[in-house]
């Protein structure tokens, strides 16, 4: 076996190249947003105020990002 072939086989077994899905829902930022965003929106609604549509979409898209139940693309 050539040297490059051996190196390739050694790397294939290494955990450095193994794919590991990023679990956004386990990050502190995600947990804080998912916990407090609905309460924040309700508080604004109680005051007769709303967030601009583009801000609401960003929060909702962020909460869906990386979640397999919302698709993966």
Image: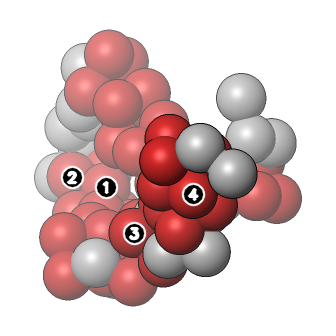
Dot label at residue 41: 1
Query: Which element is circle 3 on?
Result: helix
Q: Residue at x 24, y 42 (%)?
A: 48
30 sits to left or right of 19:
left
Dot 4 or dot 1, earlier in sequence? 4
- The reply to whether the C-beta atoms of the residues labelled 2 and 1 are less than 8 Å apart is yes
Q: Position of residue 40 (x, y in %)?
A: 22, 64
Dot 3 or dot 2, earlier in sequence? 3
Query: Which element is circle 2 on?
Result: helix
- The reply to whether the C-beta atoms of the residues labelled 4 and 1 are less than 8 Å apart is no
Q: Is residue 7 above or below residue 28?
A: above
Dot label at residue 6: 4
Residue placed most toward the observer, 27 or 45: 27
Dot label at residue 16: 3
How much space separates mark 4 and mark 1, taking CA atoms?
57 Å
Dot 1 or dot 3, earlier in sequence? 3
- Residue under label 2, please give it: 44
Query: Which element is circle 4 on?
Result: helix
User: Which mark is in front, 3 or 4?
Assistant: 4
Query: Which element is circle 1 on?
Result: helix
């Amino acid at each position: 076996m050539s040297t490059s072939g051996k190196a390739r086989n050694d790397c294939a077994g290494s955990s450095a190249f193994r794919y590991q899905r990023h679990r956004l829902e386990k990050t502190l930022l995600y947990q804080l947003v998912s916990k407090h965003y609905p309460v924040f929106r309700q508080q604004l609604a109680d005051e007769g105020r709303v967030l601009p549509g583009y801000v609401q979409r960003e929060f909702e898209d962020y909460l869906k990002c990386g979640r397999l139940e919302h698709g993966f693309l």
